[in-house]
Image (cartoon, rainbow, N blue to C red):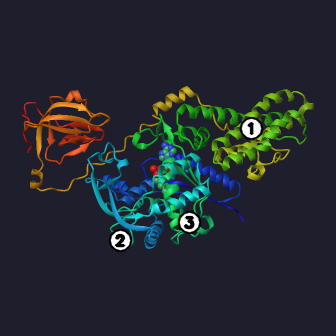
């Protein structure tokens, strides 16, 4: 009976364009899945999309389509991208799939009925126009991260998952399974930063939007984010639904690959949920690093994304796959540059691998008409190379089992480089001059072909197309390219026949290419995400409007508030004879000294508020859009104390 291996990527938010940051995790998962298949495992490789939530609902509204239409369109693009990247997933789950929705309803109800979910009050920062709750840490400059407006303290009825109840069991579990979370530094971070300070129960429902799985026993609520998203790893196997019947076979997962910012959800919330459901925990959560560009995490909102489609178009899918996993250690962050990509292609793929194959095949053609004779003459000079080739599979496996893709590839390329050196050492062109040396020449070329066979068969999980091309050129069968054969030197028949083919990777002219890439704007300056249109506010009565006291004020003095990057402190003449102090978070937009003497408008009947230990009596009016802010300024001739009406 074959052994099983279950591996997953996170399910991706349907953003209009996935970038190479997303591609990174999926390619790594694909390499691992292919490696395990090669070893004979029965692999389940799961990926998919995380399609619910308020953001999607708002984007769909802005685009004038239903949320379902909106996600359908994007998800079809994601399928195209995975096809382009040669991703060999076995299953693709969408959180909008009926069977998943059915399972989520059951999971939520079960957890509620057994007391792991309870109804409570969610308090947080609320943006009225966006109808969104935010946590303190999500706010940007204390304001709504979506529309940039003021938020208020508010509360709503919501369901909570009793995460706190599982804190001790989680710590016990980590202690008993020190390899559960990797790299190990991430485990310390979880325990010290999240568990030790005290786990809070988790809000798991919302009433402010409806694009989500409805709570079956309380239809005004929809299941919020993590129960819906994390459960995908089991619903995709048929847990709680009849669509699939693979749960017994594949669960628990062997490993979840996730980006480091979602390690917390996978190593705390997900295990706690599984404990509550009385299910075994995954073997491992591996938190990989981020691909950065220009020192910042690549992300669409920052506009610093690199488009995998452009790179695949120019260099081929395998070059990009290889680069992503060879250039950066999987557990750490890495900075993407076009130079690094091109040098990697030139040095490793064109020079080392490509040249070795084309020189070897060409020599078999030139000296033996494409088919080696069977006589052999060994020489001690062969020993080092042959030992390396025989030991390669073991070394590679050791690294692959640690998810150390970079090191596994380094091991393969050590053999490739050594084989290139062996050509220089043995000088086949000199041997070829003397007919008597032909058996020795055939031995040298056979050794080279064997190194190429072992090396490139182990590259299959990383570069499936390239490995296939190499296999065809060296006349190897699929079996000779398999896992078993990779551990044995001498699998090719002695009279192997080669087939000349195209160069695997043409050399790239770095300077020319960089210029062209710059012209093609790669990494493309992605248009910043279109701002959602300002939501329409609820109507108010004329009387309500008249209650807002808007007073013209002259700036008497203005200074920065010590230790605050945002706040300016104003002393204002509001016409009352007493100076009015207002604090305003606009230091990013204005210099304090430039505002003295200006004529501004303030709302002067708001309750006083304390900010950074200082009182603020009112709010200055400004116009804001995106990252622009303009204070409302009037003509100097308007006297202080005038009212806006
Ligand atoms: O987090 N470098 O979805 P997501 C490396 N839906 N990885 C990156 C990256 C970068 N520059 N940018 C994004 C979600 N990623 C949730 C997951 S799972 C139950 C729910 C990775 O589309 C990121 O780290 O925002 C994450 O692992 C994955 O892409 C999906 O991110």
The answer to whether marks 3 and 1 mark residues whose Cβ atoms lie closer than 8 Å is no
Residue 198 as seen in the image, left or right of residue 375: left
Mark linked to residue 218: 2
Badge 2 crowding class, 10 Å Cα cut-off, few under 14, some 14 to 19, many 20 or more, is: few
Q: Which of marks 3 and 1 is nearer the N terminus?
A: 3
Residue 348 at x, y = what percent?
Answer: 66, 35
Residue depicted at x 84% and y 47%: 493
Tell me the distance, in whole angstroms, between the alpha carbons under discs 3 and 1. Answer: 40 Å
Badge 1 marks a residue whose secondary structure is helix
Tell me the distance, in whole angstroms, between the alpha carbons under discs 2 and 3. Answer: 27 Å
Task: Look at mark 1 in the image and give the residue it sits on.
Answer: 415
Residue depicted at x 15% and y 56%: 540
Tell me the distance, in whole angstroms, between the alpha carbons under discs 1 and 2. Answer: 63 Å
Badge 3 marks a residue whose secondary structure is loop
Q: Which of marks 1 and 2 is nearer the N terminus?
A: 2
Q: Which of marks 2 and 3 is nearer the N terminus?
A: 2
Badge 3 crowding class, 10 Å Cα cut-off, few under 14, some 14 to 19, many 20 or more, is: many
């Amino acid at each position: 009976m074959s052994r099983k291996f279950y591996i997953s990527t996170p399910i991706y938010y349907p953003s209009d364009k996935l970038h190479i940051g997303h591609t990174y995790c999926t390619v790594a998962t694909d390499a691992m899945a292919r490696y395990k298949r090669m070893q004979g495992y029965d692999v389940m490789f799961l990926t998919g999309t995380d399609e619910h939530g308020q953001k999607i609902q708002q984007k769909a509204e802005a685009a004038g389509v239903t949320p379902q239409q909106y996600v359908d369109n994007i998800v079809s693009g994601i399928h195209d991208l995975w096809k382009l990247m040669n991703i060999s997933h076995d299953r693709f789950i969408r959180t909008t799939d009926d069977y998943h929705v059915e399972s989520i309803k059951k999971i939520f109800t079960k957890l509620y009925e057994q007391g792991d979910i309870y109804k409570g009050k969610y308090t947080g920062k609320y943006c009225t126009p966006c109808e969104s709750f935010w946590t303190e840490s999500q706010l940007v400059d204390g304001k709504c991260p979506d529309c940039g407006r003021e938020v208020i303290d508010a509360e709503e009825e919501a369901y909570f998952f009793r995460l706190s109840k599982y804190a001790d069991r989680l710590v016990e579990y980590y202690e008993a399974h020190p390899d559960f979370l990797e790299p190990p530094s991430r485990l310390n971070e979880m325990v010290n930063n999240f568990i030790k300070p005290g786990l809070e129960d988790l809000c798991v429902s919302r009433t402010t939007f409806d694009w989500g799985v409805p709570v079956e026993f309380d239809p005004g609520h929809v299941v919020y984010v993590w129960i819906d998203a994390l459960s995908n790893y089991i619903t995709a196997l048929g847990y709680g639904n009849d669509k699939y019947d693979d749960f017994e076979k594949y669960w628990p997962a062997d490993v979840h690959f996730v980006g480091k910012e979602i390690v917390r959800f996978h190593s705390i919330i997900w295990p706690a949920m599984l404990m509550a459901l009385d299910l075994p925990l995954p073997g491992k959560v591996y938190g990989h690093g981020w691909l950065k560009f220009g020192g910042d995490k690549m992300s669409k909102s920052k506009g610093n994304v690199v488009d995998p489609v452009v790179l695949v178009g120019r260099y081929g899918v395998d070059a990009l796959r290889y680069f992503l996993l060879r250039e950066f250690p999987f557990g750490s962050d890495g900075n993407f540059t076009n130079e690094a990509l091109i040098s990697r292609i030139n040095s490793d793929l064109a020079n080392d691998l490509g040249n070795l194959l084309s020189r070897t095949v060409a020599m078999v053609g030139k000296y033996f008409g494409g088919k080696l004779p069977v006589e052999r003459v060994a020489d001690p000079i062969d020993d080092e190379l042959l030992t390396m080739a025989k030991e390669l599979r073991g070394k590679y496996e050791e690294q692959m089992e640690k998810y150390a893709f970079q090191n596994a590839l380094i091991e393969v390329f050590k053999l490739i480089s050594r084989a290139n050196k062996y050509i220089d050492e043995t000088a086949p062109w000199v041997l070829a001059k003397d007919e008597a040396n032909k058996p020795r020449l055939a031995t040298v070329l056979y050794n080279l072909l064997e190194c190429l066979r072992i090396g490139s068969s182990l590259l299959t999980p990383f570069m499936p197309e390239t490995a296939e091309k190499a296999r065809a050129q060296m006349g190897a069968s699929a079996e000779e390219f398999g896992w078993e054969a990779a551990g044995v030197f001498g699998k090719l028949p002695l009279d192997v026949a080669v087939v000349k083919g195209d160069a695997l990777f043409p050399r790239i002219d770095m300077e020319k290419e960089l210029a062209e890439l710059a012209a093609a704007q790669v990494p493309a300056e992605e248009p910043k995400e279109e701002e959602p249109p300002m939501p329409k506010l609820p109507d108010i009565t004329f009387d309500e409007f008249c209650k807002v006291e808007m007073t013209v004020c002259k700036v008497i003095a203005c200074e920065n508030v010590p230790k605050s990057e945002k706040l300016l402190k104003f002393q204002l003449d509001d016409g009352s004879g007493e100076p009015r102090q207002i604090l305003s978070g606009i230091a990013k937009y204005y210099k304090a000294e430039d505002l003295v003497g200006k004529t501004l408008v303030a709302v002067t009947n708001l309750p006083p508020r304390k900010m950074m230990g200082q009182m603020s009596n009112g709010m200055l009016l400004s116009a804001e859009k995106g990252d622009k802010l303009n204070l409302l300024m009037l003509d100097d001739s308007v006297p202080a104390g005038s009212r806006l009406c």
